Amino acid sequence: MAKIAETRSKSLLYLDGVSVSFDGFKALNSLSFVVEPGELRAIIGPNGAGKTTMMDIITGKTRPDSGTVLFEDSIDLTKRDEADIAQLGIGRKFQKPTVFESHTVWDNLELALNRSRGVFATLFYRLSGEDRDRIEEILSTIRLTHRKTELAANLSHGQKQWLEIGMLLAQEPKLLLVDEPVAGMTDAETAETAILLRDIARTRSVVVVEHDMGFIRDLGVKVTCLAEGSVLAEGSIDFVSNDPKVIENYLGR
Amino acid sequence: MITGFIFRALDGKIVAAIGILLAAGILVPALNLLVPPDSAFHIPTYAMSLMGKYLCYALLALALDLVWGYCGILSLGHGAFFALGGYAMGMYLMRQIGSRGVYGNPLLPDFMVFLNWQELPWFWYGFDMFPFAMLMVLVVPGLLAFLFGWFAFRSRVNGVYLSIITQAMTYALMLAFFRNDMGFGGNNGLTDYKDILGFSVQADGTRAVLFALSALMLSLCLLIASAIVRSKFGKVLVGVRDAESRVRFLGFRVENIKLFTFVVSAMMAGIAGALFVPQVGIINPGEFAPANSIEVVVWTAVGGRGTLIGPIIGAILVNAGKSFFTGAFPEFWLYALGGLFIAVTLFLPKGIVGTIQHGWNGRKAMKAAADREKGRDDTVLPQAAE
């Protein structure tokens, strides 16, 4: 606990003693966890460890039973809803790629762009040159420039994952939560995605939940291993993967 | 800002549809009023009013398409907004009867005299003024939609649950309006109208103007609906339909988006009801019947949801078919309607207009692909970047 208190002053995201249970099942059990500004963090853990529940709590989808969730040291996220939290600057990529399939790639990014999101602002919105440049820039970051006029439904699985990451970028978040970004990707796509995420993490914090140990090794960042709703181990990939508790609970299975 | 908003609405199909509607709005009354009754081109007044009724139904289907086709809210209670708009108009028409009623009471409509009421209920005040009544045509359905939507969308009632409570809403209203002590004429509703703005509701000229107004209001609402769905807001709407949680996690307030659309749609349904009542000459609680609202869903599905023009075509075709069948083979109409819905669901799941559009886009895509094969990639222009 003392360690967390020290890091608190400069944290971007701060979770302390967060617990939540569903019908008696403790999904999170006094989870404590800190992300610093500009950090890229990987989270691993067996199924049911609470990885997705943790993201649900950070993004306002689920309310914790107890515990503290602070953004930028001062904003209590447990009091906000999803739209509020997204506007504060937390973007989230779902496990299953979720893009607007009946819109073009371009429109997907236009909708995600960090502009006023009120009813009348969107009714009378006109695409400005600045917005156009930003969309083009994101298109090239996510390597989809050549497909910008196509419907998102026609993209490959991997390209949908990238488009969703692109939509998060368009939101200009301070913190990106990315749930299994390389599930179902080819090895080449996985390697590309590692480069893309490291690129993104240069300007903002990223938290990646992933099962693919090769991918996490590619990322080369600090790893947190969750099990049964709390942190089991934290450190470099080699340190975590040699931890006997981690081997017993996760890797050894 | 507003002009940009409206200009965006004017794509080819919408312009064509509005052109046809406005032409019909001029031509049909002209053929009724100017062509002598013995001519082959004469349109009798009853036929004109019948077509006017179809246009009102088309406007109702358009309103439903906005919430169902674009926002994914399957409302099974849109008939309620239509009926409320109709009652607002009916109340104005009742107050215009004045002392010409059967009981000759200058203030109270006949049914109130019959029930031994001594004074006009407070909610009937103001309905003798046309502008006030027209305001209520928008406000009453809009307010109900706002209150209903406020609670339903905030509590995230979705999908089939929302459909069921909209159905319950219209059913509850039907039961309420059937009661005599509600003050809306109970079972018999409001009828026996005499005149509107001083013109006899029976006169050919009045009927012609009502028809033309129906065509005009349908065109106007089509224009507004088109402007809405082609704006960034409209793209968000489709996003809500296809991936609601994604929209929410992008920072949009989904409940406000749905609420705005639901209220606009309810107001359009109210306008449709208000134009319907003087043309058919009666409004009664039967208009709140759940089956009516479900029929609107059938028209919209037949025409093609999410196309705006499809529901208009669907409403006109199905109702023209209904007029024909109920005249020629009255006992078969319900079978025909049921059969039509099954056939459309099985063979034309996108509806008439949806299927045509799909075929058209498919051909365009094939052509573009063929062009790409030939190495003429530059023919594919970045549309969205215009």
Image: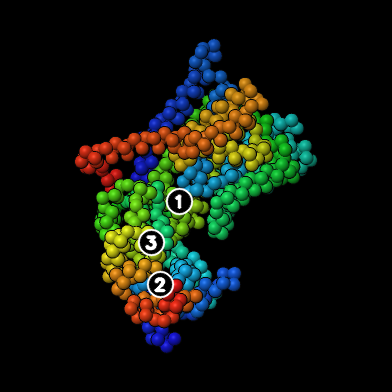
Determine the residue positioned at 54% across, 24% down: B48
Secondary-structure class at tag 2: strand
CA separation in Å, label 2 and label 1: 30 Å
- Residue bearing the label numbered 1: B242
Whether residue A182 sits left or right of residue A83 in the image: it is left
Looking at the image, residue A183 lies above or below residue A207: above
Residue at (63% x, 39% y) in the render: B291
Tell me if I can see residue B128 in this picture. Answer: no
Q: Where is residue B175 in the image (x, y as percent from the top left)?
A: 70, 44
Please tell me whether mark 2 or mark 1 is closer to you in this view. Answer: 2
Inter-mark Cα distance, 1 to 3: 22 Å
**In terms of sequence position, does the residue under pointer 3 or pointer 2 come before the other?**
2
**In the image, are marks 1 and 3 on the same chain?**
no
Q: Quarter-wise, where is residue B82 in the image?
A: top right
The local crowd at label 3, few if under 14, some if 14 to 19, many if 20 or more residues have their Cα within 10 Å, is some
Q: Given the image, what chain letter belongs to the residue carrying mark 3?
A: A
Picture coordinates of residue B353 (x, y %)?
44, 34
Q: Which of A145 and B287 is in front in this view?
A: A145
Name of the residue lying farthest toward the bottom: A2
State the image coordinates of residue B112 (x, y, percent, origin top left).
74, 39
Look at mark 2 in the image and give the residue it sits on.
Answer: A44
Query: In the image, is A152 to the left or to the right of B314?
Result: left
Residue type, label 2: Ile
Chain ID of residue with mark 1: B
Disc 3 marks a residue whose amino acid type is Ala
Picture disc at residue A183: 3
